[in-house]
Amino acid sequence: MDVTPIVDLDTGGVIALHAPGDGHGNISSAIRTVLQISRSEALLPLVLPIPSSAVIGGSAALAPLHEALRTAGRRPREVILMVRGDFAQVERQSLLTGLDGLRAIGYLIAVGDLGTAHIPLDLLTDAAPYLAVISPDLIARMPRDPRRAALAESLAALARGVGAHVLAPGVSEEAQLAAVRAWGVRLAQGPLLVPGPSGRVHVPIAVTPEPVQALLGPRVHEFLLPAMTLPAEANAEEVVEAFGTDPSITSVILVDEYQRPKGSLDRSRFLLSIASRFGHALHGKKPALRLADSIRSAPKTTPAIAAMQVAGRDAERVYDDLVVIDEFGRCMGIVRVADLIRQVAAMQR
């Protein structure tokens, strides 16, 4: 089954996969989608459309979906459930209760079809979605319809204002891409954004650095690597398991329910603490946050030289990974200091 890549327009990287399905009707469509997606596609987060009626129906209505995700090897924190469909006012509280329940399990929440579905705008404040998806119909028509373009732009601003990421789906023309970038939208998908053999996407928008910015080097988002994240409540054994999945993982970032970093665990120091005498007995079942270092973060627009200055503030942690955050303080990924050093050295040649 084909899935559509969701692209970070700042980096050209594919950061998630959007599963097919309209999210209307009953939950069986979502279950079929989950079971047909191959294990090879399980490394990236999955955006899965589900009908609002299933959320309103409560835990019993969604139990088959939870089981399908478990069978497919998907953990809740790797799935963004995109709720679609019209929201009747009389069902509002049931919907919000259902969304809170899904968040408690670990799912991230998205609201779809902004601009064409019957979604009260104040519902965005109460639902507090992680992701807001503009209606693909608005995106398709806005290059030739200034009124719809104005509506889509205002919806993007509203969604960012309530703390949600914004996704523009169905981008097929450079005019659409230029517009959504001008609105400050960072996530997009569509025929124009197809990954090449390297897995990255050429985003056809030229960005000319300001003279001062050029002297300070590229911004840190150009060096962005995926972060290994775990909930802030994770225990030390879960962190050991995370490090064990890939020897190239240099850090684990502990995040809260809104993906804001709360602590950083350096691979060498953490595993040394666990491997020491009585280390596992002392720490294994206890919160890993007890062993975490404070976060060293850099906003995504930080120039390379400024990021190196952040790294150099603590001589004992000078080579620890930097956490890159977005405008809402949420973890976007990590940057390795060695990559920054190589870039700055190349600038001096």
Image: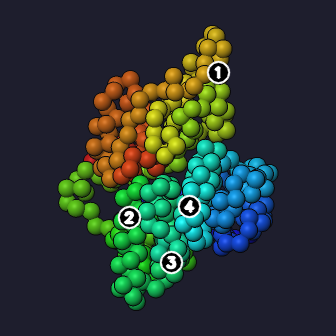
The residue lying at 65 percent from left, 31 percent from top is 238
Is there a contact, CB below 8 Å, between mark 4 and mark 1?
no
Could you tell me how far apart the alpha carbons at marks 1 and 3 are, in whole angstroms? 50 Å
Q: How far apart are marks 4 and 3 (CA)?
A: 18 Å
**Which residue corresponds to mark 1?**
284
Q: Which mark is residue 298?
A: none
Of mark 4 and mark 1, the one earlier in the sequence is 4
In the rendering, at what x and y percent does residue 335 appear?
Answer: 43, 44
In the rendered structure, which disc, 1 or 3, sits on the residue that comes first in sequence?
3
- Quadrant of res 14: bottom right
Q: Is residue 93 above or below residue 88?
A: above
Q: Residue at x 52, y 27 (%)?
A: 289
Q: Residues within 10 Å of mark 2 (few under 14, many from 20)?
A: some
* Disc 1 + disc 2, Cβ < 8 Å: no
Quadrant assignment, res 9: bottom left
The image's colouring method is rainbow
Q: Where is residue 16 in the image (x, y as percent from the top left)?
A: 58, 59
Q: Residue furthest bottom?
A: 144
Q: Which of marks 1 and 2 is nearer the N terminus?
A: 2
What's the CA distance linking mark 4 and mark 1? Answer: 42 Å
Residue behind mark 2? 158
Relative height, residue 84 to residue 232 (above, below): below
Instruction: Residue under label 3, please give it.
Output: 116
Q: What element carries label 3?
A: loop
